Amino acid sequence: MTSRSILVATILLVALPLMAADVTGKWNFEVSLDIGSGNAVFEFEQAGETLTGAYSGAAGEAKLTGTVKGTEIRFQFETEWGAVKYEGSIEGADSMNGKAVYAGQASGTWTAIRAK
Protein backbone atom coordinates (compact mmCIF):
# COMPACT_ATOMS: atom_id res chain seq x y z
CA MET A 1 0.00 0.00 0.00
CA THR A 2 1.16 3.50 -0.73
CA SER A 3 1.20 6.18 1.93
CA ARG A 4 -1.70 7.88 0.11
CA SER A 5 -3.92 4.77 0.22
CA ILE A 6 -3.07 4.29 3.92
CA LEU A 7 -4.09 7.90 4.57
CA VAL A 8 -7.40 7.45 2.72
CA ALA A 9 -8.15 4.21 4.60
CA THR A 10 -7.37 5.89 7.93
CA ILE A 11 -9.64 8.84 7.14
CA LEU A 12 -12.47 6.47 6.21
CA LEU A 13 -12.05 4.45 9.42
CA VAL A 14 -12.21 7.63 11.50
CA ALA A 15 -15.09 9.22 9.56
CA LEU A 16 -17.44 6.21 9.38
CA PRO A 17 -18.46 6.28 13.07
CA LEU A 18 -19.18 10.01 12.76
CA MET A 19 -21.66 9.53 9.92
CA ALA A 20 -25.33 9.59 10.88
CA ALA A 21 -27.13 6.30 11.18
CA ASP A 22 -30.18 5.88 8.94
CA VAL A 23 -33.36 5.29 10.94
CA THR A 24 -35.77 5.59 7.99
CA GLY A 25 -38.66 3.17 8.38
CA LYS A 26 -41.09 1.82 10.96
CA TRP A 27 -39.99 1.27 14.58
CA ASN A 28 -41.75 -0.44 17.50
CA PHE A 29 -41.18 1.34 20.82
CA GLU A 30 -41.64 0.15 24.40
CA VAL A 31 -42.01 3.18 26.66
CA SER A 32 -41.76 2.98 30.45
CA LEU A 33 -42.86 6.21 32.17
CA ASP A 34 -43.22 7.02 35.85
CA ILE A 35 -47.03 7.00 35.33
CA GLY A 36 -47.17 3.70 33.42
CA SER A 37 -45.87 1.94 30.36
CA GLY A 38 -47.01 1.19 26.85
CA ASN A 39 -46.12 0.70 23.22
CA ALA A 40 -45.92 3.11 20.32
CA VAL A 41 -45.10 2.95 16.63
CA PHE A 42 -42.91 5.57 14.98
CA GLU A 43 -42.43 5.95 11.23
CA PHE A 44 -39.25 7.91 10.46
CA GLU A 45 -38.10 9.61 7.26
CA GLN A 46 -34.49 10.77 7.36
CA ALA A 47 -32.71 13.16 4.98
CA GLY A 48 -29.16 13.72 6.20
CA GLU A 49 -29.43 14.83 9.83
CA THR A 50 -33.08 15.95 9.46
CA LEU A 51 -35.78 13.66 10.79
CA THR A 52 -39.52 13.80 10.09
CA GLY A 53 -42.26 11.25 10.51
CA ALA A 54 -45.25 10.17 12.51
CA TYR A 55 -46.11 8.86 15.98
CA SER A 56 -48.99 6.51 16.82
CA GLY A 57 -49.65 5.45 20.40
CA ALA A 58 -51.55 6.13 23.62
CA ALA A 59 -51.32 9.89 23.09
CA GLY A 60 -52.99 9.57 19.67
CA GLU A 61 -51.29 10.33 16.38
CA ALA A 62 -48.93 13.18 15.55
CA LYS A 63 -46.31 14.38 13.10
CA LEU A 64 -42.76 14.53 14.47
CA THR A 65 -39.55 16.41 13.74
CA GLY A 66 -36.02 15.84 14.94
CA THR A 67 -32.37 15.20 14.19
CA VAL A 68 -29.90 12.36 13.90
CA LYS A 69 -26.27 13.25 14.55
CA GLY A 70 -23.92 10.29 14.46
CA THR A 71 -25.58 7.78 16.76
CA GLU A 72 -27.58 10.39 18.70
CA ILE A 73 -31.27 10.80 17.95
CA ARG A 74 -33.63 13.55 19.15
CA PHE A 75 -37.22 14.10 18.11
CA GLN A 76 -40.46 15.59 19.36
CA PHE A 77 -44.15 15.84 18.61
CA GLU A 78 -47.09 17.80 19.97
CA THR A 79 -50.07 16.39 21.87
CA GLU A 80 -53.07 18.16 23.33
CA TRP A 81 -51.11 18.27 26.63
CA GLY A 82 -47.95 19.77 25.12
CA ALA A 83 -44.62 18.71 23.61
CA VAL A 84 -43.31 15.17 23.93
CA LYS A 85 -39.52 14.91 23.62
CA TYR A 86 -37.40 11.83 22.99
CA GLU A 87 -33.61 11.59 22.96
CA GLY A 88 -31.35 8.60 22.82
CA SER A 89 -28.72 6.48 21.14
CA ILE A 90 -28.91 4.37 18.03
CA GLU A 91 -27.42 0.93 18.68
CA GLY A 92 -26.54 -0.69 15.36
CA ALA A 93 -28.96 -0.78 12.45
CA ASP A 94 -32.04 -2.13 14.22
CA SER A 95 -32.24 -0.89 17.82
CA MET A 96 -32.09 2.27 19.89
CA ASN A 97 -32.90 3.45 23.41
CA GLY A 98 -33.13 6.58 25.47
CA LYS A 99 -35.24 8.90 27.61
CA ALA A 100 -38.58 10.60 27.03
CA VAL A 101 -40.40 13.53 28.63
CA TYR A 102 -44.15 13.79 28.06
CA ALA A 103 -45.20 17.44 28.24
CA GLY A 104 -43.31 17.92 31.50
CA GLN A 105 -45.90 15.70 33.21
CA ALA A 106 -44.23 12.28 32.92
CA SER A 107 -40.78 10.98 32.10
CA GLY A 108 -39.05 7.67 31.63
CA THR A 109 -37.11 5.45 29.28
CA TRP A 110 -37.72 3.78 25.95
CA THR A 111 -36.32 1.02 23.78
CA ALA A 112 -37.05 0.52 20.10
CA ILE A 113 -36.58 -2.17 17.48
CA ARG A 114 -36.89 -1.65 13.74
CA ALA A 115 -40.00 -3.37 12.40
CA LYS A 116 -39.29 -6.16 9.92
Image (cartoon, grey):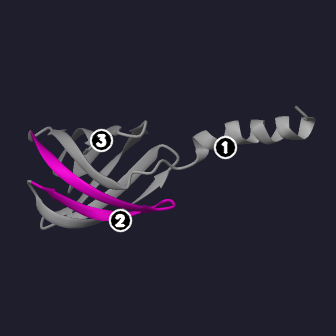
In x, y percent, where is residue 50?
45, 63
SS at circle 2? strand
Label 3 to label 1: alpha-carbon separation? 27 Å
Q: Quadrant of the C terminus?
A: top left
Q: Is residue 73 left or right of residue 80?
A: right
Which mark is first along the chain, 2 or 3?
A: 2
Under mark 3, the amino acid is Lys
Q: Main secondary structure of the magenta part?
A: strand
Under mark 2, the amino acid is Thr
Which residue shows up at 18% across the image and 41% down it? 31
Query: Where are the magenta residues, as a range?
Result: 37-57
Which residue shows up at 24% across the image and 63% down it? 54
Q: Most extreme residue toward the top, as rendered?
A: 1
Which residue shows up at 26% across the image and 46% down it? 100
Label 3 to label 2: alpha-carbon separation? 19 Å
Look at mark 3 in the image and give the residue it sits on: 99
In x, y percent, where is residue 90?
41, 40
SS at circle 3? strand
Look at mark 2 in the image and give the residue it sits on: 52
| Label 3 vs label 1, nearer the camera | 1
Q: Most extreme residue toward the right, as rendered?
A: 3
Label 2 to label 1: alpha-carbon separation? 25 Å
Label 3: how many Cα within 10 Å (few below 14, some 14–19, many 20+) = some
Quadrant position of residue 96? top left
In x, y percent, where is residue 97?
32, 38
Which mark is first along the chain, 1 or 3?
A: 1
Q: Which mark is residue 15?
A: 1
| Label 3 vs label 2, nearer the camera | 2
Under mark 1, the amino acid is Ala
